[in-house]
Amino acid sequence: MEIEASTTNKRFNRLSMPKDVDDFFAKPSKSFVFPAPTTFEKPEFHASRPLANQQRKMIVKEDGSKIMDTDDSFTKGPWTIGESCALKNALFVYLQTNGIDSSEALNFVASTAKEKNDKYPGNHSQFLIELYRISGLNRSLTQIACHLKVKLEEQNWERAGDKWTPEEDTRLMELAQLYSRSWARIERALGRKGCRERLRQLETHAVGDYETGHFSKQEQLQFLRGLLVHHHPVSEDIIFPEPEVLQKIEADFVPTRSIISLRKKFENGFRLVWIEAKKRGWTGADDEKLTEEDLETVKKAANPGKFTRDLEIVLLRV
């Protein structure tokens, strides 16, 4: 019985195929040749043509010729002592020529890498090219920049054993707040090691002839007088005293307490006493009229709840 393909459903019926179609599905013979794959022509690579994203730093020699920063003619490998001395001398010649203090060498080199700096204006590449010319070294700009940074940090960190000055302590506290205690950045900015240990000593009152523990009534009274005289914030949003203000208060009113101790005292509730004293109209002109009885009254007004001798437990209750 012959089966025909249905034209209604238009389905493919293999039984209605001719024999030549069946022969097509059969195994191909050995003489069958597949078409050759499409070949793509590989582009030529020119070694003299730089890549599009490659930065080319040119150095102008004395004779006017130009070479690239990545040229193979530069010396490779570790630096010798003579090369380091030549680079150091070139740096200080450049600083002296431009009227920059040698103690600011590390900050100057770091700032030249920035696009815009008001204190140390200049271009980083131009600065390195000047060092290349003055030193006469056969080193690339990248090598000079990396080696210069390492040697300057080593030179400044030789002061790790020196005694800390009050100015360095104040600067350390400012950098600790600025860089969120990122010790690598703090040591680089301050130019010496041991910043973390020094700040711990300052916070635990392990240095200096300072008192520890609770503030006496007389110390609290003197601290309040110092705040009324020296602490005048320009905005209501900024009520915490600056390190310079605390340094003046320590020198003039509370010499028995460190700057860290005064700052913590202010943060842990004494700022409420200062705010209440300002509300009552006390200023730096009539601060001598304050007595210990006035201090007790102000402290009780700052804390309407249960009054205790230690005001440090009073937090944000006005």
Image (cartoon, rainbow, N blue to C red):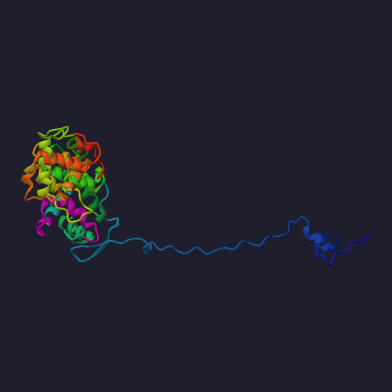
**Residue lying at 82% horizontally and 63% vertically, measured from the top left:** 20
The residue lying toward the viewer, choosing from 252 and 52, is 252
Q: Quadrant of the N terminus?
A: bottom right
Task: Residue 21: give x, y in percent of width and height.
Answer: 80, 62
The residue lying toward the viewer, choosing from 101 and 256, is 256
> Is residue 251 shown to the viewer in this render?
yes
Task: Residue 87: give x, y in percent of width and height.
Answer: 17, 51
What is the quadrant of residue 8 in the picture? bottom right
Q: Quadrant of the C terminus?
A: top left
Residue 100 is one of the magenta-drawn residues: yes
What is the quadrant of residue 157 in the picture? top left
Count numbered badges in the picture.
0
Q: Is residue 48 left or right of residue 284?
A: right
Q: Magenta part mainly helix, strand or loop?
A: helix
**Residue lying at 19% horizontally and 40% vertically, measured from the top left:** 300
The residue lying toward the viewer, choosing from 227 and 145, is 227
Task: Residue 286: give x, y in percent of width and height.
Answer: 6, 49
**Residue lying at 14% horizontally and 45% vertically, measured from the top left:** 170
Q: Is residue 144 above or below residue 310?
A: below
> Is residue 81 shown to the viewer in this render?
no
Residue 34 is one of the magenta-drawn residues: no
Task: Residue 190: give x, y in percent of width and height.
Answer: 17, 46
Q: Is residue 3 left or right of residue 219?
A: right
Magenta segment range?
A: 94-116
Q: Is residue 232 above or below residue 168?
A: below
The residue lying toward the viewer, choosing from 222 and 127, is 222
